Image: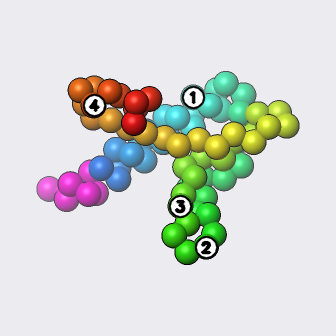
Amino acid sequence: MGTPGKFRKAAGDAAEDRALAHLQDAGLRLVARNYRTPGRGGGEIDLVMRDGGTLVFVEVRRCSRSEFGGAAAS
């Protein structure tokens, strides 16, 4: 049996895969995935997409229970 952290990572990766497929189906093009921002204390951008001449930065949220308000509320 895997560790809870590995399960969460796998579930998060699967959610990111679904988001990427959805955005590509909508015509956006992938520029970068899991882009690490530079500098100390930098973060990560899940998906950087291009929609025509516009860069779109995507944070993918996966919530296992709706009682916390769902992904949009997080």
Query: Dot 4 corresponds to which residue?
Result: 68
Separation of marks 4 and 1 at Cα, in angstroms: 24 Å
Task: Give the camera-side residue of 54 and 4.
Answer: 54
Give the amino acid at mark 4: Phe
x, y (%) of residue 55?
75, 42
Q: Which image quadrant: the N terminus?
A: bottom left
Give the amino acid at mark 1: His
Q: Is residue 3 magenta?
A: yes
Query: Dot 2 corresponds to which residue?
Result: 39
**Residue at x-position 57% and y-position 38%:** 20
Query: Dot 1 corresponds to which residue?
Result: 22
x, y (%) of residue 35?
61, 58
Please report contact status of discs 3 and 2: CB closer than 8 Å, yes or no: no
x, y (%) of residue 18?
49, 34
Q: Is residue 26 above or below residue 55?
A: above
SS at badge 1: helix
Q: Residues within 10 Å of mark 4 (few under 14, many from 20)?
A: few
Q: Is residue 31 above or below residue 40?
A: above
SS at badge 2: loop
Q: Residues within 10 Å of mark 1 (few under 14, many from 20)?
A: few
Choose the circle earlier in sequence order: 3 or 4: 3
Please report contact status of discs 4 and 2: CB closer than 8 Å, yes or no: no
Choose the circle earlier in sequence order: 2 or 1: 1
Q: Residues within 10 Å of mark 2 (few under 14, many from 20)?
A: few
2 vs 1, front mark: 2
Separation of marks 3 and 1 at Cα, in angstroms: 24 Å
Query: Dot 3 corresponds to which residue?
Result: 43
